[in-house]
Image (tube, rainbow, N blue to C red):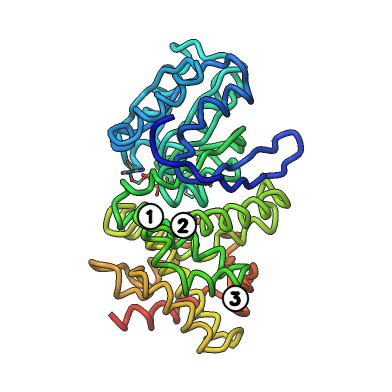
Amino acid sequence: MTGPVRIEPAIVRVALADRSYDIVIGRGQIATLGARIEALRPHAKTFIVTDGNVALHHLDAVEAALAESGVAHSQLVVPPGEGTKSFKVFADVCEAVIAARIERGDLVIALGGGVIGDLAGFAASAVRRGLDYVQVPTTLLAQVDSSVGGKTAINSAHGKNLIGAFHQPILVIADTTLLDTLPPREFRAGYAEVIKYGLLGDPAFFAWLEANWREVFAGANSASSAREHAIAVSCRAKAAIVARDERETGERALLNFGHTLGHALEAACGFSDRLLHGEAVAAGMALAFVFSARLGLIAAAEAERAVRHLAAVGLPTRLRDIPGRLPDADALLQLMAQDKKVKRGELTFILVRGIGAAFVEPGVDPAQVRAFLSEKLAEQ
Ligand SMILES: NC(=O)c1ccc[n+]([C@@H]2O[C@H](COP(=O)([O-])OP(=O)(O)OC[C@H]3O[C@@H](n4cnc5c(N)ncnc54)[C@H](O)[C@@H]3O)[C@@H](O)[C@H]2O)c1
Ligand SMILES: [Zn+2]
């Protein structure tokens, strides 16, 4: 066989009874896609949903891998970007899947970042009342976060991810070489979610990241398997939480660490290139550490250590790191209150008692948050 040498993949099992599935993580794993699909669903037809950027770099390799195992495939290429998580494109995907005669027993393949995973996964959940699908995540964010756990959604005029379904994939293939074509800024933003797993529950992983992040970023040029390790640990962390709380009635909320303020900052920036999701989450996590220190939950030096690593990789950690003007503290609070994690006027925040010790605090006083944000905005 030609192509890059393949190293044994890491396999993370997501244990959800009859909806359990494997996440296969490793270099060159895309080449195994057809064989893995044929083993799971013999003679299934497939329909690939991808975006223009990903198609340019990786669609040929995916088609070749399917053809090699005799897996029939057709595809739809949609425009890149968050705007694609719309009713319009959702309808396009559903109609294309139906037109391609994909039926129960066949498969949808989501080839792309979180946008494609959310869109194609939701279409798979809806067409014929539920088709199986495979995630082939192509961004770091998608490999460590959005492709795992079965949340799928499109956006409403009223907010992000408001229309969707829980629908687990039957397989996830995270080929780490695909990340080498990702713009560096996108890789760094995805890395914020990797740090998140350390900060919320795994201090040893956080310390490992502090020591090894350069290798994680180095990609194909690196002889080490640090990137694969970081992705596998992240997936294992998410898989364990999802297995215990699939529908987010409790513990899964911890995965929203840094996200309440993060979402407000993203909204304030119009969900634009001004601030990517992972960048917003980085700032949200850093400020959650500083706020926790302010509340006396954690020593200032430990909060500083968390912030230092985020800053070391070039992620924003202060409000003044976000380019352009931000709205005032009241407006930011308003945006946080629109977040679906808000109940009856009290803010639910994920706070920390230490690095690796996050917890859900449902009763945060908005006045205290307002004062904190005003102070941080004044540091501009
Ligand atoms: N379902 C979940 O649990 C979950 C979790 C987190 C985020 N999300 C969603 O994920 C989305 C963000 O995902 P994302 O950050 O992956 O964004 P994305 O899918 O928009 O990808 C980012 C950019 O990178 C490009 N790209 C993707 N892979 C590439 C590659 N290998 N080489 C070159 N370019 C590539 C894309 O075309 C796009 O321009 C948001 O819509 C968010 O709501 C979902
Ligand atoms: Zn996130």
Which is more toward the observer, 323 or 54?
A: 54
Question: What distance separates the C-alpha of mark 1 from that of mark 3?
Answer: 31 Å
Left or right, 160 with respect to 200, comes to left
Report, in whole angstroms, how far the alpha carbon at label 2 lies from the one at label 1: 7 Å
In this orientation, which residue lies closer to the viewer: 151 or 362?
151
Question: In the rendered structure, which disc, 1 or 3, sits on the residue that comes first in sequence?
Answer: 1
Report if the CB atoms under discs 2 and 1 are less than 8 Å apart.
yes
- The residue singled out by tag 1 in the image is 219
- Number of marks: 3
Q: Are marks 1 and 3 in contact (CB under 8 Å)?
A: no
Q: Earlier in the sequence, mark 2 or mark 1?
A: 1
Asked whether the residues under the numbered discs 2 and 3 touch, taking CB atoms below 8 Å apart as contact, a structural biologist would say no
Q: Looking at numbered disc 1 in the image, what kind of residue is underneath it?
A: Gly
Res 317 → quadrant:
bottom left
Residue 79 coordinates in the image, percent (x, y): 30, 33
Q: State which mark lies toward you, 2 or 3.
A: 2
| Residue 258 visible, this orientation | yes
Q: Nearer the viewer, mark 1 or mark 3?
A: 1
Classify mark 3: residues with Cα within 10 Å, few (<14), some (14-19) or many (20+). many
258 vs 39: above or below:
below
Which residue is identified by label 2? 227
Dot 2 alpha-carbon crowd within 10 angstroms: few under 14, some 14 to 19, many 20 or more:
many
At 45% from the left edge and 12% from the top edge, which residue is drawn?
100
- Please identify the quadrant where the C terminus is shown: bottom left
Q: Position of residue 211 (x, y in %)?
A: 47, 74
**To which residue does mark 3 refer?**
352
Residue under the point 44% across and 11% down? 99
Q: Residue furthest left?
A: 324
Q: Which residue is located at x 57 percent, y 85 percent?
A: 295
Above or below for 253 versus 115:
below
Instruction: Say if residue 338 shows up in the picture.
Output: no
For mark 1, give the secondary structure.
helix
